[in-house]
Image (cartoon, coloured by chain):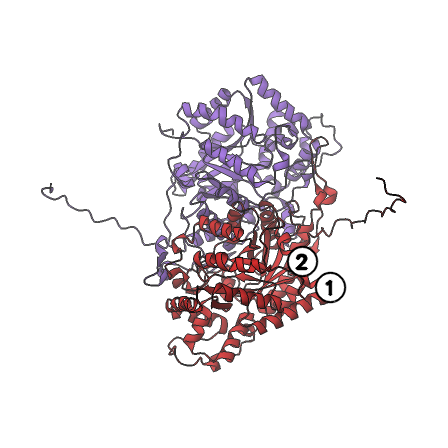
Chain colours: A red, B purple
Amino acid sequence: MTTPNRQLHLNLFIYPAGHHEAAWRYPGSAPDRVLDITYYQELSRRAEAAKFDAVFFADGPALPDNIRYASRFRLEPFTWLSGIAVATERIGLIGTASTTYFEPYNLARLFASLDHLSRGRAGWNIVTTGAANAAQNFGLDEHPVHAERYARAHEFVDVVTKLWDSWEDEALVVDPESGVFADTDRIHPIDHAGKLFRVRGPLNIPRSPQGRPVYVQAGSSEDGKALAARYAEAIFTAHQTIDSARSFYADIKRRAKAEGRDPDQVKVLPGLSPFIGSTEAEALRLQREFNELTQPEYGLEQLRRVLGVDLSGHDLDEPFPRELIPDDPELNAGSRFQLIVGIIDRERPTIRQLLHRLAGARGHWVTAGTPEQIADRIEEWFTTGAADGFNVMPPYLTGGFDAFAEHVVPILQRRGLFRTEYTGTTLRDHYGLPRPRSRFAAPVVPAPRREPAASAPA
Amino acid sequence: MTTPNRQLHLNLFIYPAGHHEAAWRYPGSAPDRVLDITYYQELSRRAEAAKFDAVFFADGPALPDNIRYASRFRLEPFTWLSGIAVATERIGLIGTASTTYFEPYNLARLFASLDHLSRGRAGWNIVTTGAANAAQNFGLDEHPVHAERYARAHEFVDVVTKLWDSWEDEALVVDPESGVFADTDRIHPIDHAGKLFRVRGPLNIPRSPQGRPVYVQAGSSEDGKALAARYAEAIFTAHQTIDSARSFYADIKRRAKAEGRDPDQVKVLPGLSPFIGSTEAEALRLQREFNELTQPEYGLEQLRRVLGVDLSGHDLDEPFPRELIPDDPELNAGSRFQLIVGIIDRERPTIRQLLHRLAGARGHWVTAGTPEQIADRIEEWFTTGAADGFNVMPPYLTGGFDAFAEHVVPILQRRGLFRTEYTGTTLRDHYGLPRPRSRFAAPVVPAPRREPAASAPA
């Protein structure tokens, strides 16, 4: 599975003050700058200096209820990534956008435009919106159920892909002499008429530098995996253990192959939230310090949302009351539900212990250690079929990222696991993905093979 | 009506290679840079150096059919303006966005975020989508009729306004000590339940620097004027003659007053496309040169779309066949229809003459002259109740704007009609508009008046 040249892929997942729920209370974070674009530009430039593949932004079209306790508003990814694009040169720009509450034509335009603006560095993290309160921001009484959201996601991605293909590369002529600005024979209506969408097209923006922005996917439920196997070129996934990650990895690669795809072109990138210290004890102390800054109300709200269980009034030091989790098929279908229940069943934590387990990165892998230890764990996941790289989720920013960039990245580079220089300019280049041709373009006819001359000229 | 300190407001309306349909064929334009964000950043910085109020971008969610003959794709305004925001300091950033094909929650987020990113320089040009082919990009068989689109626009703006108000200024607490990130008592669901939209809110982004981005409106039909009188703080409008502009100006100010608004806080900004020469003959020669580069197919498509009349096969030098314009109430309701029919009735042009009349700026006021002449005309419109300023639409870019900035702006400044320095930092500051309080905020109670002490302490 590993080839000598196989390289790690690393994204910096940017959350306002950091991923730990108490990051904004930690003296080393910058909560006063969370609405300041220059803060995000600086972070992205540091990630670029560390040769990261991309920065990554989450999104959701509703306000989380626990905003009282943490920096959980939602920066709007298209505007924010555009502001970062023009302040960077090489790093990829991955934005999350919901297939549940956007119109495909609007979304296709936003990403095509971001891809132009960044000269080929855009990626779309394809999600369905799981937050039930979002429905009421879009005129719906009921949040669409899991399967329905994924059915919409499949058709949505299909429509957006067609729109991105609707201009062939050669459509933009710009010949002042003849007066032809665009060759309309190479601009195609898509005439999509599906179960959920009818979209005529074409897009009103020329084909973008990457042809299609990179398809990223997050959400590892059964439905999510099916979507990923079909479309995703990079997958952001949450695993608490290397075994869970390995089995996910093998499953996804197998499914991609079954879809007729090259499994190497589906990069599996689990989340990783590292507490880094010059000794392991120092790293663990730092993690404890963060846990002490948490507020239980924050995590209890998260459990209410994901597990459907209300624990207010319970003693936080009692064993987690597993039996109170309702049997709700809709909630059960979510990958985050399954992940948290997995922790409960495996570790039998108290409520407080579970809250601390989730405080770091909402269920993603949190690990504390020295730079060597972190690098060892990354290498182990990378070389034993658990990951092609990671979405790095620093507990706090900017310091939590600086420690990773200054101390862990050089070790990975010395071991030959991570690039020391970019070898391309687009996000597709960084991930080693081909640039797709438009489905409307004529197939490439190989140039006629010339017989070698009987005697080579001098 | 004029006060000594009354100042012109000038926006630069940026169209890829310029506003003249043949701009991209003119040797002084840069059609090879129309997808390059640095070109737009440079233009915006030049407009900022000239102390313009704002740059302005049009938009529409469909590809115009005449893309073959001119640079008529659609840059996506949110991404593009974000890329410009971080490369400028003071100039306003006005983006057009359709109330017909967006969801209010998504649109409110995009603008609030742009306002944060630019530190208070965002403006929303509120339009309904008139292009009939857009409907088919959004699953509709029929383009919604004019009145229906405006009914939706009214409710849409109401919803977006409530969402922008949903966080009070004081909601963002960020107190690491107490652990309160946001005061949820100051974040309000909007619970909008209207005829067309049901939106619970709140927005998931804190209140933006301007409170609400500036409300701009374009489209001067009866329905358009009603919307403008109710909401607009700046109006972009098309007039061929000073008389038409004066009557529009008086009408809008009267309507705003009837809505209980201060008419001075509704800036009327007609479009102005200037051909500038060091002599009038030179300016007219330049305009002729552009007209000679036009392609009739481009303009004929525009007439088909706006007037509903197909003139292919007609001799372009025959008088415009007025009788062929169909009596279509839907088309007749459009302000662009009325404007073009006005030209036909007033000037009795040949088809070719009409095409040339519209080639410059699609029906906006095109004028050719020396810098002094252009300044005189601007001053006349400004001081006799026809305009509060202009949306400047250079025939070609960047040269057409440079000529205006270098030669016309200094004359306006010398006459005391236009600022020589910015006096504020936000677009509201530039337009002299107050920053609105959130509707959910407690009314400001005047501080109790202190009686002057009988004897003042030393």
Q: Point out the tag, 1 or 2, that comes first from the N-terminus.
A: 2
Q: CA distance from mark 1 to mark 2?
A: 17 Å
Judged from the image, the secondary structure of the residue bearing numbered disc 1 is loop
In the image, residue B324 lies at what x, y percent?
69, 34
Q: Say which mark, if any, is on residue A158.
A: 2
* Residue B353 against residue A58 in the figure, above or below: above
In which quadrant of the rendered image does the N terminus of chain B lie?
A: top left
* Residue A66 against residue B225 in the figure, above or below: below
- Residue type at mark 1 is Gly
Residue at left offset 48%, top offset 56%: A406
Asked where in the image residue B75 lies, by quadrant, the reply is top right
In which quadrant of the rendered image does the C terminus of chain B lie?
A: top left
- Residue type at mark 2 is Asp
In the image, residue A296 lies at what x, y percent?
39, 71
Judged from the image, the secondary structure of the residue bearing numbered disc 2 is helix
Q: Is residue B68 left or right of residue A405?
A: right
Q: Nearer the viewer, mark 1 or mark 2?
A: 1
In the image, residue A306 lies at what x, y percent?
50, 71
Q: Between B349 and A384, which is closer to the camera in this rendering?
A: A384
Q: Chain under label 2?
A: A
Q: Is residue A151 left or right of residue A186?
A: left
Residue farthest to the front, as pictured: A458
Residue farthest to the bottom, as pictured: A323
Q: Between A31 and B19, which is closer to the camera in this rendering?
A: A31
Q: Chain under label 1?
A: A
Residue on which the image places disc 1: A260
